[in-house]
Image: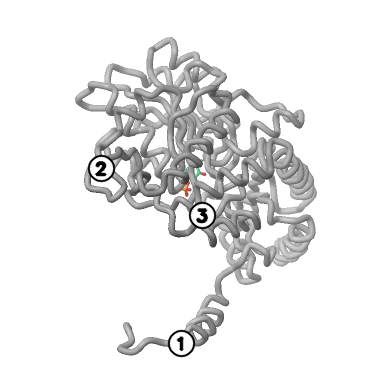
Amino acid sequence: MLPKKGTSEEEILNELEKRLNVDLTFNSGKILGSMCTYPHSLAQKIICRYMDRNLGDPGLHKGSREIEKEAVQMLGELLNLKKAYGSIVSGGSEANILAVRAFRNINDVERPELILPKSAHFSFLKASDLLRVKLVWAELNDDYSVNVKDVERKINDNTIGIVGIAGTTGLGVVDDIPALSDLALDYGIPLHIDAAFGGFVIPFAKVLGYDLPDFDFKLKGVQSITIDPHKMGMAPIPAGGIIFRKKKFVDSISVPAPYLAGGKVSHITITGTRPGANAIAVWALLKHLGFEGYKKIVKEAMELSRWFAEQIKTLDGAYLIREPMLNIVSFGTKELEKIEKELKKRGWGISAHRGYIRIVVMPHVKKEHLENFLIDLKEILGEH
Ligand SMILES: Cc1ncc(COP(=O)(O)O)c(C=O)c1O
């Protein structure tokens, strides 16, 4: 209830401390099933210092706008693009919606259709509903990557775009993006890559020697990429990224925003008023960590994932769904629902609603957390 008279800061803070005690925190070592992590300490400082900056009115905050542009450019360079167009947005969902919106707008089709893998994130359902674009689901291969032949079979005159995934939400699978790119070029259809998760993993993992397909603008058919700094980029929520190869995509989704205090500009994002601090934090982390800094984070996460996958293989009553490609390890168990319930009772932040338990080895996940989890898992499996 809204109090008539205000409450002291101290009381408010004390109440929050008590009430939010039930939230799982990343540093508890219990959150094993999230793609978010504890933000980098530099980003925390930046959020406090620049929390008043509004990228929705860039005429007022010209410095912030410049910094956002540079952040977009650095993300583009990470993805092998010389000149990048796009924005720091609220997350992977908004980024995917913007890509579908651009593909729809540049295509003059009455009944637009988008072909995407059955493994795609549910944000495309939102895009479909908002934009009235029909989703055409492509089958998966036995290894859970998209079946490129099925994608080709589903292309028709209404197809406005194809989606490939570089790091699926459930299993971290990277589709055969080079083959999708060839297909997109052959048929003259734009290809969007959802690298919301993999965008901050694959470029570094490849340099570390992991055998992963190309997925970025190096491939000529790729026209746009979702890449989320608030996942493996260590940035605070909200921070997603949408990067386009060509200006025409951005132009197709620009709307004029005439009344702003800072002067007339145009917006491509779904949000109007939006946090400058988060975009500034993305810029700061890219500069501060650099390629080598992110490589180190990815090295640890990938090595720990491999170790954990090997441990799962030794368990009675549990099995890997597939060998991990990125730092996501998913496994099935006997009596999955019961096992999930027991793990949750012991405080583990995991879910099994996809038919398996997914462990995302984010930077806050340490070996000792996984060892503790394995002790509990073994015990619970033994009881069933
Ligand atoms: C592959 C992929 N795309 C998009 C999203 C949506 O990102 P967000 O939750 O930041 O909107 C996710 C989130 O898990 C994802 O895994």
Q: CA distance from mark 3 to mark 1?
A: 28 Å
Q: Residues within 10 Å of mark 3 (few under 14, many from 20)?
A: some
Residue at the outermost bottom position:
5
Looking at marks 3 and 1 on the same chain, the residue that comes earlier in the sequence is marked by: 1
Q: Which residue is mark 2?
A: 257
Q: Nearer the viewer, residue 161 or 339?
A: 161
Where, by quadrant of the figure, is residue 379 drawn?
bottom right
Query: Which residue is located at x 45 percent, y 50 percent?
Result: 276
Whether pointer 3 and pointer 1 mark residues with C-beta atoms closer than 8 Å, the reply is: no
Q: What amino acid type should be assigned to the residue bearing mark 1?
A: Ser
* Marking on residue 8: 1
Q: Nearer the viewer, residue 325 or 281?
A: 281
Circle nearer the viewer, 3 or 2: 2
* Marking on residue 237: 3
Q: Is residue 364 left or right of residue 139?
A: right
| Count of labels in the image | 3
* Label 2 SS: strand
